[in-house]
Structures are given as structure tokens and as C-alpha cells.
Image (cartoon, grey):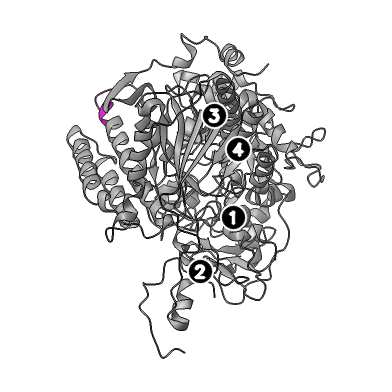
């Protein structure tokens, strides 16, 4: 019997919670460096902080061995510009992103994180290889493939001339490999412990960050972590606008509910770009990479229609139809691939014909479309399905194993693309489904500098927390922040938790289990999402944004104040809802702050000071202006902490 | 067939995200400790498969199956509203996960 109701049906037995209940029991733990969030960024941070001589503690809502976006794998590594085969220098990559005064770096974050990724990312990848992840084609399975370098055995994705995006053989087990290293180095690991607040010197907002409080998701016990330096690597914030456990089909990792950003905000950290998210399909799609498509891990796959008619690929610069597969992996002369993560218009690499929607609508191409894997050359086919889908997070087991065990054979079978209104085929990837315009996705985070440090002393950020969204950026900023936090901790004063701050937080944390009845966390979450959808969706005005803020405050006072948790798991979920209220307030205020301006969101910041919201404006590409040097190379040399 | 019925909430959707083969599973609970969402909890009876408590929170990452030391002891099942199909190129026939009489499995491991 593997369900609780089988026990009920058998003899009316209802099972007790399987872990000891320890509400209110305190654990006091000290460290030089506390890492909040044990995903890719957090693990690289912990490893590098330890190597720098710090005593390190890492905490995670899940098991560090499998937590985070890459818990179940990773298939390619972006912007590894210093790898021996790359023809793209870090400087050239930045220049390409910054062409025409653009400051959109896609999922690589901002200029700082993009340069760090490009400059140091390959070194982080070498670390990963030493931890036991194969990465290269050591088995010589792909000899003769265009994407393979025979000397180094590296395999490349997207751009076979730029050679700066590396395919990761065995990436499916990258997290267990990193976890082994984290353990080997003696980092103290606290799995299933959620950080609930940041502790500050004297309990003051804006004071030095000296650690965090935590809650155990299994036992409900309380933790007081005091640390000389804290690295926030708790990932992004999902589920702010949409929530459904019945509609799946999204990459948003469920533990990433924005707790890190909310905690930092309440501690007085400066934050930015909260209102910048794109439209979200909110789960109306299919599981990532399960449906036929030609993007991301499936890039360059042949696409055919219901009658087997092939959809052409075009060069983005001159629009000419490409005659060969090989041309899809080579950009126009003088150009190289950059990872944009943005709308189709920001991409430079070859794509399917841009008028595909019109030609579906007029019947020239008939749905459904299919990913024609059998039509691809064997090496390319195996690279897409066996290497990439076979190692990517959420696809290694969830797609590769499930589909192949169910009889799917990439040599003879073509995955179907979802049937959608014709205009949706312009937006990629197709498995995501249709974006609903007023359902946004969370964005933004804590403002940081060239030390990956926030405005609060002792608080560093890494990974998605620092604005990026990609594996390589998370790994590299983690590596970098780990060094910086450890260096700071070497001379920082001993932290002492403020009793009043701890007591207030403890009372807040346990409120949901003090109730006897009340709204459950799921209904509360859905209700909060509705406020975000209606009042912070596509239509924005001062009036409606303020109404949204009022509604959030009202929910906080009533339903939020009476949310009822029946066990430690529900308690954690209830606290995530309370985080949601804080994040919602941040988003509304960020939107109000820039409603009247034409200044892009990246330049406006907000922070709490003595409970009041203060706004600031940063100049365009402030990271290359005083007090910083004017070039990326100089800033990296000065701040990276590398010899 | 039961001649009794109990008050239980509606079946959760999705209902069977992970299923266990009780003959093969030895209750080691490795999968319980692999799950980032707390979907699985230990069975009060030692040696028996874990209890699937929160199937609604499953992310379908499959680490529970990937980390299981006994092949076949557990299985990941996509929700019915996520079962995208495929077409066999030469015959034009369509297949999907969960169909009756599926094609034989392809046991090729992924790269690495």
C-alpha cells in the first residue's frame, strides 16, 4: 500500500505524520559563511568558500543532492568563452549583447553576471569535470560529428563556429556529483530546512546581515543560523501570477517561491526589476521538451507538418532560406550565437520561417507539426535526444526515460507539437503553450555590485538571485560569490543574533499551526495570484496598482493572518504564501515607481528604510561607471578575488 | 469489492504520479530523500514502499526513479493531461504514453 487512503479503506486507519513533531524547538548553528539555497549556485559557492578557508553551512528546502533547477540534470553550458575551442572572447560577447545600446542580456542577467559567466564559466565547468561529470565525448560516440572537437572531445551546441556553448554528457547527475564534493569538503548540510528570515545586527533593517532563521519541513523545528557572511542563492520566484497543481507544463522549480528576495527586502536590501516579467502560460503547456519543437535543447531539429512537408529555416540577417542542416549551426558572417531568452526579435541565430503562423493559417502547412528526429543525421539526432533531452533538468528521467520506456524510439518516431492557434507558433518553445497576456512571470532580484555583494554588509548573492537564469551563470556567480564571502568573513566581526528579532520571527513562523481552522495554503496562494493577474497584469494604471496593493494588504490582515497548517509541510507552504504577499507588494511598488517614466526597469531600484520605501535610480550601465572602472576586464581583475 | 465506504477527499489530480511495485521495493526510502517537494514520506510499516502523500506537488523530475537502487521498483507516470504523443515516421501511426498495447521499450541509455 503506497497511498494514505489505502490504509483508510483497509481498516479505517489514518496515518500519523511520519516524522517527530518538534515545533518551537531551537537549534543554534554558527558558521563563517551561510549559504541559503543549495542549488547550482549555492553548491559552487559553498565549495569555493570552503576552499578559501571558511567554515560553511548550506541550507535547502529540499535535498542538496537533487535540489534546484539542475537537480535532475543539465544539458548545455552557455557562454564558456575561454574554453580552448571558443572563437568568442568575453569582450566580444559583451559587445554583441550591448550593440545598439541594448542592456538586455537574456538569461545571463546583467553586464556583471554576463561577463563573469563568460570569463570564469569555463573554469567552473572544469571544476565540474573534476567532480566526475564526463561533459566530453570520452567514449568517442560522436567521432565525425560537426559539433565535436577531436582534440579536446568537447561537443558544442547552437554555434559550431563560435564553439562557446558546450553540451554536457552525463549532466543528468551533475547535482549528485556536486553534492559529493560539498560533503567531501566538510560543508555542514541542512536538507529540508527553509530559510524564513535574514538576521541583522541589532535586529535593525539595513544593518549588517548576520545569518538567518530556518524551519525544518519535516519536523517543524526552528533554526537560528549566525554567520559572518551570508550568500543568498535561493533562486527565482515562481508562482506569483499563476498557480495550479492540476495544470503542469512549466520549468519553474517548485521550491523557488521567492523567499530569498522577500527576506532580503525585509532586511533592507535594495531590489530591482520586480515588475519586468514576460507573459506566462501558467501551466497551460506540456512538460519541458516533451513535445516536438525546434528550440533550446531541440535547436535545429527538422520540423515537418502533418503531411511530412518540411518547414524551412532561414538566416536571420538576410532572410534567405538555408539549404543545409549545417547552416543552421552557423550564423551570418561575423556573427555568433548569443543566448537571449527573449522574444523572437532579439534572436540572431537561424530560425524557422518567421511567417510560419500565416502559412499555417492559410493551409500551406497543416497541423499537427512534428519534430522529425528520424530525418536528422544520426549524430545530430543522438545529440538532441540522447545527449540533451537525455541529460537536461526535468528531462533526464521525466522525459527521456518515461518516453523511451513507453516505446518511443528517436530513430523512427517523431514527437508531436501541441496543436495551437496558428499565431502561437512564432513563440518558442512550443511545449510551453500559449502565453496568457496578463499572467506575468516573476523577475528581478537583489541589486549587487562587482563583489556580488548587496547594499547590506555581509550579504552576497549568486545564481538567479543575482538576476541570471542560466546554469552556467548560476555556477559561475556562485563560484565567485563563495570567494568574496569567505574573504569578507575572514576579518568580519563575530555575529550575535538579536533576541527580539528572533522571537518576533519565531512567533510569525508558528502562527499557522496555532490556528484550529482556516483557509488552506492552496486557496490562499490562488487568491494572491488572482490579485497579481488582475491588478499587475498587462493593464497598469496608478489607480489599479494602488487597488492591488490595498487588496494584498487586506488579504494579509484577514486570510493571510488565519492561514491554517496541519503539519510542518503545510506550515512551510503557508509561509511561502506570506512571502507571496511581500513579493506582491514589491512588484506593485516597483510598477508604481516606473509608471510615469520611460527609464528601463533595470535602472530603478527600491528598498525599505525604517519601514518606508525609498527609490533610487542607477545610470545606464552603472557597473562601468565610477566608482567602477570603465572596462569589464579591469573590474573583473580588481574584484574577482582571483590571483 | 468493498461493502464499506469512507469519507475521503476527491482523488487528487494528478493521482498516480509515482507508483510502486511492492514486490520489488524494499522500503529503503532513497526516493523519499531524493524528492525536493516532499511528495513521498516513509511508510509506517518498515520495508514497505513510501506513502505518496502530495502527488499534486510533484514536479515530475523523476529523481525518485533515477535514484532508486532497484530497477522497476518505482515508476513515474505523467498526468493524463500531459501525455503528448508521437508519430511513427514510416507508418504514420500515432502512439502515446499510457496506451493499451504500447510498442516495446527502447532501452538505450542517454549519453554520459
Against A205, is A147 above or below?
below
- Tell me how far mark 3 sits from mark 2, CA to CA: 48 Å
Q: Name the residue: 68% across, 31% down.
A: A163
Other residues around mark 1 within 10 Å, as few (<14) / some (14–19) / many (≥20): many
Query: Which contiguous range is marked in magenta?
Result: A592-598
Distance from the alpha carbon under mark 4 to that under mark 3: 40 Å
**Residue at label 3?**
A317
Query: N-terminal of the two: label 4 or label 3?
Result: 4
Q: Do labels 1 and 3 share a chain?
A: no
Q: Is the magenta stretch mostly helix, strand or loop?
A: loop
Label 2: few (<14), some (14–19) or many (≥20) C-alpha neighbours in 10 Å? some
* Residue that mark 1 sits on: B34
Camera-near label (3 vs 2) is: 2
Res. A618 in view: yes
| Residue under label 4 | A43
Mark-to-mark CA distance, 1 and 3: 46 Å
Q: Is residue A208 left or right of residue B50?
A: left
Give me the chain letter of mark 4. Answer: A
Secondary structure beneath label 4? helix
Please say if the residues under marks 3 and 2 sit with CB atoms less than 8 Å apart.
Answer: no
**Where residue A314 sits in the image (x, y, percent)?**
56, 38
Image vertical order of residue A468 relative to residue A248, above or below = above
Callout 4: few (<14), some (14-19), or many (20+) C-alpha neighbours within 10 Å?
A: many
Amino acid at each position: 500500500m503506497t497511498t494514505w487512503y489505502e490504509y483508510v479503506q483497509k481498516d479505517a486507519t489514518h496515518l500519523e505524520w511520519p516524522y517527530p513533531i518538534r515545533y518551537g524547538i531551537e537549534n543554534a548553528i554558527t558558521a563563517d559563511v551561510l549559504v541559503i539555497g543549495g542549488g547550482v549556485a549555492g553548491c559552487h559557492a559553498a565549495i569555493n568558500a570552503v576552499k578559501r578557508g571558511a567554515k560553511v553551512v548550506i541550507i535547502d528546502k529540499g535535498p542538496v543532492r537533487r535540489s534546484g533547477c539542475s537537480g535532475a540534470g543539465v544539458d548545455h553550458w552557455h557562454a564558456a568563452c575561454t574554453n580552448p575551442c571558443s572563437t568568442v572572447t568575453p569582450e566580444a560577447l559583451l559587445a554583441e549583447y550591448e550593440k545598439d545600446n541594448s542592456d538586455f542580456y537574456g538569461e545571463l542577467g546583467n553586464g556583471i553576471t554576463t561577463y563573469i559567466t563568460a570569463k570564469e564559466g569555463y573554469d567552473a565547468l572544469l571544476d565540474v569535470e573534476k567532480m566526475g561529470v564526463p561533459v566530453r565525448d570520452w567514449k568517442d560516440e560522436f567521432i565525425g560529428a560537426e559539433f565535436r572537437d577531436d582534440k579536446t572531445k568537447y561537443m558544442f551546441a547552437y554555434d559550431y563556429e563560435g564553439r562557446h556553448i558546450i553540451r554536457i554528457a552525463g549532466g543528468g547527475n551533475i547535482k549528485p556529483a556536486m553534492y559529493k564534493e560539498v560533503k567531501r569538503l566538510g560543508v555542514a548540510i541542512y536538507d529540508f530546512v527553509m530559510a524564513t528570515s535574514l538576521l541583522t545586527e541589532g535586529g535593525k533593517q539595513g544593518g549588517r546581515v548576520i545569518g538567518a532563521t530556518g524551519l525544518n519541513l519535516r519536523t517543524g523545528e526552528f533554526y537560528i543560523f549566525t554567520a559572518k557572511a551570508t550568500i543568498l542563492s535561493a533562486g527565482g520566484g515562481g508562482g506569483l501570477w499563476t498557480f495550479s497543481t492540476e495544470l503542469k507544463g512549466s520549468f519553474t522549480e517548485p521550491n523557488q517561491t521567492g523567499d530569498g528576495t522577500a527576506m532580503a527586502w525585509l532586511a533592507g536590501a535594495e531590489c530591482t526589476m520586480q515588475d519586468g516579467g514576460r507573459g506566462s502560460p501558467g501551466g497551460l503547456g506540456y512538460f519541458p521538451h516533451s513535445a516536438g519543437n525546434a528550440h533550446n535543447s531541440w535547436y535545429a531539429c527538422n520540423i515537418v507538418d502533418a503531411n511530412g512537408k518540411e518547414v524551412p529555416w532561414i538566416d536571420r540577417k538576410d532572410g534567405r532560406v538555408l539549404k543545409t542542416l549545417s547552416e543552421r549551426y552557423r550564423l551570418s558572417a561575423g556573427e555568433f550565437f548569443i543566448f537571449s531568452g527573449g522574444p523572437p526579435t532579439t534572436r540572431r541565430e537561424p530560425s524557422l520561417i518567421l511567417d510560419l503562423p500565416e502559412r499555417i493559417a492559410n493551409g500551406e502547412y497543416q497541423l499537427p507539426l512534428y519534430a522529425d528526429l528520424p530525418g536528422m543525421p544520426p549524430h545530430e539526432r543522438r545529440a538532441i535526444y540522447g545527449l540533451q533531452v537525455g541529460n537536461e533538468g526535468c528531462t533526464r528521467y521525466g522525459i527521456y526515460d518515461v518516453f523511451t520506456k513507453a516505446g518511443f524510439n528517436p530513430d523512427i518516431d517523431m514527437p508531436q507539437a501541441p496543436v495551437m492557434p496558428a499565431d502561437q507558433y512564432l513563440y518558442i518553445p512550443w511545449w510551453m503553450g500559449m502565453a496568457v497576456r496578463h499572467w506575468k512571470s516573476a523577475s528581478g532580484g537583489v541589486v549587487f555590485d562587482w563583489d556580488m555583494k548587496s547594499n547590506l554588509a555581509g550579504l552576497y548573492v549568486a545564481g538567479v538571485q543575482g538576476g541570471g537564469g542560466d546554469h552556467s551563470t548560476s555556477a559561475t556567480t556562485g563560484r565567485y560569490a563563495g570567494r568574496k564571502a569567505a574573504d569578507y568573513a575572514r576579518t568580519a566581526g563575530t555575529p550575535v543574533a538579536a533576541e527580539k528579532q528572533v522571537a518576533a520571527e519565531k512567533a510569525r513562523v508558528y502562527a499557522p499551526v496555532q490556528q484550529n481552522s482556516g483557509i488552506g495554503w492552496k486557496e490562499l496562494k490562488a487568491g494572491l495570484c488572482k490579485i497579481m493577474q488582475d491588478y499587475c497584469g498587462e493593464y497598469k494604471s496608478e489607480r489599479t496598482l494602488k487597488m492591488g496593493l490595498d487588496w494584498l494588504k487586506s488579504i494579509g490582515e484577514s486570510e493571510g493572518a488565519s492561514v491554517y497548517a496541519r503539519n510542518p509541510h503545510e506550515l512551510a507552504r503557508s509561509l511561502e504564501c506570506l512571502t507571496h504577499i511581500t513579493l506582491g507588494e514589491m512588484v506593485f511598488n516597483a510598477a508604481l515607481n516606473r509608471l510615469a517614466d520611460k527609464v528601463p526597469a533595470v535602472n530603478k531600484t527600491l528598498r525599505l528604510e525604517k519601514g518606508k520605501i525609498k527609490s533610487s535610480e542607477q545610470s545606464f550601465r552603472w557597473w562601468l561607471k565610477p566608482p567602477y572602472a570603465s572596462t569589464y576586464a579591469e573590474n573583473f581583475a580588481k574584484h574577482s578575488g582571483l590571483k | 469489492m468493498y461493502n464499506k465506504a469512507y469519507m475521503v477527499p476527491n482523488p487528487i489530480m494528478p493521482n498516480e504520479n509515482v507508483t510502486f511495485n511492492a514486490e520489488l521495493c524494499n522500503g529503503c526510502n532513497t526516493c523519499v530523500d531524493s524528492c525536493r517537494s516532499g511528495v513521498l514520506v516513509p511508510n509506517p510499516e518498515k520495508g514497505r514502499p513510501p506513502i505518496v502523500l502530495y502527488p499534486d506537488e510533484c514536479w515530475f523530475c523523476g529523481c525518485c526513479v533515477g535514484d532508486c537502487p532497484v530497477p522497476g521498483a518505482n515508476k513515474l507516470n505523467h498526468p493524463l493531461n500531459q501525455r503528448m504523443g508521437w508519430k511513427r515516421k514510416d507508418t504514420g501511426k500515432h502512439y502515446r504514453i499510457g496506451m493499451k498495447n504500447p510498442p516495446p521499450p527502447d532501452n538505450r541509455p542517454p549519453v554520459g
